[in-house]
Image (cartoon, rainbow, N blue to C red):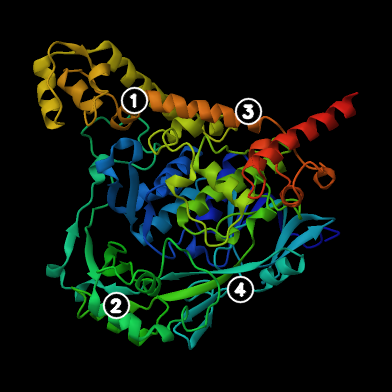
Amino acid sequence: MGSHVNIEATFDVVVVGAGHAGTEAAVAAARLGARVAIVTSALETIGQMSCNPAIGGVAKGTVVREVDALGGIMGRATDLATLQFRMLNRGKGPAVWAPRAQCDRGLYRRAVRSLLEEHATLATIQGTVARLLIDEGSVVGIETLEGRRFGASCVVLTTGTFLRGRIHIGTETKLAGGRAGEPPAVHLAEQLESLGLQVARFKTGTPPRIDGRSVDYSRLERQESEIEAFDYSWSHFWDSPRRAGETTRHPRQLPCWITFAGDEAKAVVRENIGRSAMYGGAIGSRGPRYCPSVEDKILRFPDAERHQIFLEPEGHDTHELYVNGLSTSLPVDVQLRMLHAVPGLESARMTRAGYAIEYDYYPPTQLDATLQLRALSGLFFAGQINGTTGYEEAAGQGVVAGYNAALRARGETPLILGRSSSYIGVLVDDLVTRGVDEPYRLFTSRSEFRLTVRQDNALRRLAPVALERGAFDEREARVVERRMTEEDRSRDLAERTSIRPEQAAPVLAAAGSAPLAHSMKVVEVAKRQGVSLLDLLRAAEIAELPAAEAAVTAELEIKYGGYFERERAQAEKMQRLDAFPLGGGIPYGEMRSLSMEARQKLLALTPATLAQASRIPGVSPSDLQNLVLEIERRRARASG
């Protein structure tokens, strides 16, 4: 840029985009004391749920709680907007429980905006960013299409599907758009490509929406909410923790409905597959394997008898339903025929057609572990721009990018979350070391530490990180301390309290467990499968029961302590590898003891630690051993 002429205002961090990644990045930076601006093309769409009106799920629910533990807003907004809550995997035991909530889109959007505006150092600005301002190899601000310029020490790009976004409905309808009804970001995409960044294309899609008044509910299976059991965020109840049996203050709950696409609907899709944008040649880019279109399902799983469909409410102020399971890029007339072939939807009125959207992303191996672009200092990427899919994955990246942008602006040590401490750490490490060849989605199987990295203990794992960086105010710090105290008290009560056979009998009978022969400490009885610690404490007539969720964490530590200890020992081993630094400037190309592939990958990705190097595809265990020898030999020569 060369000068600061016509700069309207200067911030520590400017965030471009106000979806799930952008809002989390802005709040994270503001919590660390940074002066932040979040710039979006329409302030009314801050926190927009562009696809499914749901937050959480397997692995994803844990990420929401991790974001929450770091001071993020996704969990808080979800609690203020939840229409229906389900704890997935409830039959498998609390170690693998996974929270998922359906949200009122309007309430969620308003909650996000109000949570943003709680931060005095965070400004919201309406405008479409046209280009980055760059000076001597560093980003120094942004300029909007409207001609406004804002200076910044760091910029976080969270552009979602807007970079050269193109909407497809069938093979003939193509619309330029970042999402339905909103224009794409073309100027910024062209500038990023001109900077020499590697760019690629992915696609994602949405299903049609229908008018719930046109549905025959007598043919559907009803699914009720379980909201009485859960809050997403730890932050709402300042005065005292929620006790067992207490309810929460959520919006009025609504049911979801279950139906299926059977032979008739499948036949409609097969007969018109050539008119699908994905299968008719209009789109060549890859979509998310684990959130497939209905066309993908029917072609990839031809022997499946039927495919489940969930009808999910969009909000209290509308009868509109989201048809989860029928994501499609078929023409409108075919979508209508497909809907009418689904039991209960024979007379359904389609309020919005489904569509596929194709967009630019930037392979994330171009980023370092802070999510900063290696080629351009001060520029961070978060969300779908990195080739991920999902609100929760976007939010996790947003927190990491926001923290690190603020820390860089303050000249402080960056935040890098390890794989052993969080799913967010797994997500970021996978992206920057392994890259993506399809839209990336988190699964429990991606983590080596899924027993000790759970949804129930996110606060204990990550709140210390937020406290150390000064992200919580005094009141929040007291709430965190109270929650930790409740967990410790739960364990202490279990160890100190004895329970008589007649007291334990109903609890054990309900769990199908053998009765006690004599009085025992609660901690010993709670080790039995299916036996609830909280139920035992209640049966033992404890006057003041611990907070329900704190008791769950204590129970898991009691039941699975041996497994947890083994996993924590593995985590310590990984941390020792993380303690072996590599950093930049290492001449990997000269290390002939390494394979050619290892030298090329290490030069391209410049891992920060030996642990990160170990996860790069193409770097073998023998390469790692030789790398340690090479590094230690060179360091010995340098110090000698």
Q: Secondary structure at mark 3?
A: helix
Residue at horizontal 59 percent and vertical 61 percent from the top: 385
The residue at the far right in this view is 640
- Between marks 4 and 2, how big is the CA–CA gap? 33 Å
What is the three-letter code of the residue carrying label 1? Ala
- Between marks 1 and 4, how big is the CA–CA gap? 49 Å
Q: In the image, which disc is placed on residue 381?
A: none
**Nearest-to-viewer mark from 2 and 1:** 2
- Up the image or down, 20 lies above or below 249; here it is below
Which of pointers 1 and 4 lies earlier in the amino acid sequence?
Answer: 4
- Between marks 3 and 1, how big is the CA–CA gap? 28 Å
What is the three-letter code of the residue carrying label 2? Lys
- Between marks 3 and 2, how big is the CA–CA gap? 53 Å
- Between marks 2 and 1, how big is the CA–CA gap? 48 Å
- Up the image or down, 453 lies above or below 124; here it is above
Question: Residue 132, image x and y in percent?
Answer: 73, 62
Query: Which residue carries the number 3 mark?
Result: 576
Query: Which residue carries the number 2 mark?
Result: 266
Which of pointers 4 and 2 lies earlier in the amino acid sequence?
Answer: 4
Nearer to me, 193 or 149: 193
Query: Which residue carries the number 4 mark?
Result: 164
Quarter-of-image position of residue 537: top left
Question: Residue 505, image x and y in percent?
Answer: 10, 22
Question: Residue 147, image x and y in percent?
Answer: 71, 70
- Mark 2 is surrounded, within 10 Å at the Cα level, by few (under 14), some (14 to 19) or many (20 or more) other residues, namely many
Question: Residue 131, image x and y in percent?
Answer: 71, 66
- Mark 1 is surrounded, within 10 Å at the Cα level, by few (under 14), some (14 to 19) or many (20 or more) other residues, namely many
Quarter-of-image position of residue 455: top left
What is the three-letter code of the residue carrying label 3? Arg
